[in-house]
Image: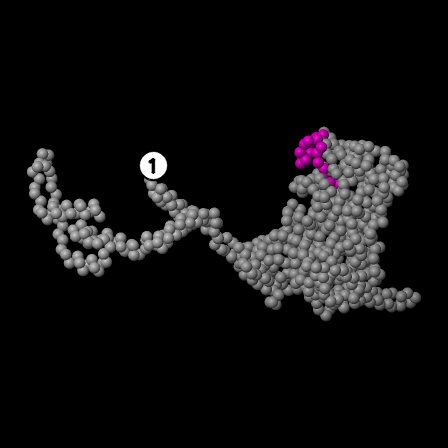
Amino acid sequence: MTGLSVGEVSGLIAAGVFVVAAIVTPLGLYSSIEPADSPTTVAFSYSKDPSAFGDGTPPRSSWPFTGVCGNGIPCPGTTLNETCAKQGLLQNCTISYDPRIPAALGTLFSDGASSFSPSVSSIFDIQWRTYVRLQDAYSTFKYYMSAGYRQLETLILNEGPQVIEGLIVDMDSGGIGFRNHSIPTSILEYGATWEEDILFVQPETQCVNLNVTLDFQYGSTTSNGTVVLTDRGGFSALSRQAPSMNLPSNAQGKINLQQRAYNAAWLNNFLTLVYFNATGENPSNITRLDVTRGQNFPVDNSSFSVYSTAVQSSLYFGSYLNFNKTNPYNISANNFQIINNICGGTSPGSPANIDSSIVGCAVLYGAATRIDGGSNLIIDPLSKWSAPIYSCASAVRAKVQTVSFRYNGTGLGALKATSIKPKTYSNPSSFPRWAVQNLDWLQFSDAMPMWGILGSANSSQNPLAAAWNMSTIAAESLYLPGFMDWLYITSAAPVPVLPASQNLPALNFYSQALYTALNIGPPSARYSGYQGYADYSGWSSLGVYAKWQKLSTSAETVSQILNLVWTDVAANAVVGTRGWGLTSAASTDPTGFAPSANISSTDVNTAPSSQIPVVLYHQKIRYRLPFAVPAFVTLAITLVVLIMLLLLAIRGKTGVKQMRKFLDATSMGRITARLLWKPVLDQETKSFVNEYGKRHVTITYTAIILEEGDAADEPEKSDESNQLGEDATSNLLNW
């Protein structure tokens, strides 16, 4: 910048910074929605689900919970009356019983769950989503409520936590949490968040790859061609040392699903080799494996169907073999049925207690994919396909999980479950104390034991627990009791049959859902007994099948197929009835333990417990600091200038006195006096006024225009004017 001094350049730069700061600094202001620093209590009320689950869920029935314990065997606390009358030589007896669950037993579980956490459900807060009333001639009620399963909707293609009528459904890991949904009654301008402890029942599955595939090629008309069983190492590399089949019992904490799935896979492959005479029949002395990797074995299409559009699962191992044909060692379906019995660990004859946890084992035929380079979603003539085979073991457990909720808007559609995490405990003494009814004198074929939470591990022992013969354990989760083997089904009952006169959904729904997950297949004649279940094979939904293809790629991910199917079936089967601000889902009365009537928006509990602590969100004004950089530079420049002025003031180079001096010196009177009489420059104002203030000065101005050549004829000025002009010029220059 030529011609400008350093001071001028600095001034221009500072002015530019000031302009930028004035424009940029306000741009950093913004508003945000943020949580409050502390929770606020608000009232909750019921909100109906506007989806198909809400529309299809009928009002809750007031019929009581009932239980049965086999033919002619009364359950604990129930009564059985037998009246006999002699007619001639014959004695005719009639039996009648009151199947209602005693109020004390119902209160034991209900109060136990509430004492652990007010939002945690008991088994009496679980009801059938859809139900029917069936007749029982021997019951004093003559009728009882039973499951009336009808598919409302499928959630298979959804991901993340789903909030539906009465449940929170985990479509990532699998499982359902029981909550009758209530939301804040007041309108929250910016929403709120909170957490609740929720009882979840969830499947747990481990799978092992058989390293054997079903390979096939379509014909020219896209009809199945020849199907073969191809060894991928499961036969040729089979361990010659048989795994130990003496597995631990199904007691709590001793269920190794991975080991059970491996044992089932080994036995399945061994028996298949024996069927094809590729090895001897003694599993403890394998001297030959007459098979090479990649070798094919024929599969009879007449007894087993392979699909490129459906996954299949079956409790029957070795179902790809035709047992109607003879084989050298006479291997039959009975040999393969042993696999399921060994893997499952329990049977209908197992004692109904805490150490008889349900384990279901099945073979899973994964989704087929093309091996000729074509699209996995298109069936072309002559296309080649391959389907993996897995051995899977599944159990079902109950646990308490912490669910984070966000509510922003109105209605249940504005309620979102943002996360589902296992509840954290500070130490083992804060674990829930689980209880399972000990029915050692009964088998699973007679009765299913009750289960639930009786409080925290450190809570005092409930005397009612001992009175009702409860076995307890303090743990983070509880494996639920039951059995699942090949005897679980018959040709006349393609789905599990519920005990007559029993209305305790929490004791049966999980085994029914597990049975469905372990028996997936296309809606063909073989699977005509679905009785209202959706098609989970992917046969009728390309979206579902595409998802199964992704999950079928490994043993770690394929287990999710069974978990998600279990979850979807369970979500359609049952509903939770406990919720914040609502009347209890189950109420006691002198005549027995009965579920509540229809829960509605008017069932708001006015007790203090209905005031739920939530974190409200508010609007706050925030600032982005990068936009303040020009302002900080401006501030720095200002501080530098102020510091310089302060230093000058301290040294006397500036200040009010100096400013007054300069202002006085530039006044009109002082300038005139300076020109005429040369006063002292820093003369005091009072002294100056006294000396010069009353003097009169006349200032005139004469304009003279000189024509060319008239310089010599310039008019003569008066002495006073000349003197004033000369003095003024001289004094001004000197000053």
- Whether residue 333 appears in this view of the structure is no
For residue 79, what is the image quadrant? bottom right
From the viewer's side, name the closer residue of 271 and 514: 271
At x 79%, y 32%, the residue is 294
In the picture, the quarter occupied by the N terminus is: top left
Q: Which residue lies furthest to the right in this view?
A: 89
Task: Please say if 712 is above or below 578.
Answer: above
Q: Is the magenta stretch mostly helix, strand or loop?
A: loop
For the residue pair 329 and 620, the one nearer the viewer reads as 620
Determine whether, in the image, residue 424 is placed left or right of residue 392. Answer: left
| Point 71% across, 36% down: residue | 369
Measuring 60% from the left and 64% from the top, which residue is drawn there? Answer: 610
Q: What residue type is labelled 1?
A: Thr
Q: Is mark 1 on a helix, strand or loop?
A: loop
Which stretch appears magenta? 365-382
Q: Residues within 10 Å of mark 1 (few under 14, many from 20)?
A: few
**Residue 13 seen anywhere in this rendered image of the structure:** yes
Residue 16: x and y in percent read 38, 44
540 lies above or below 473? above
Residue 598 falls in which quadrant of the image?
bottom right
As drawn, 224 above or below 588: above
- Pointer 1 residue: 2
Q: In this view, does 189 lie to the left or right of 69?
A: left
Q: Please, which colouring scheme is shown?
A: one colour
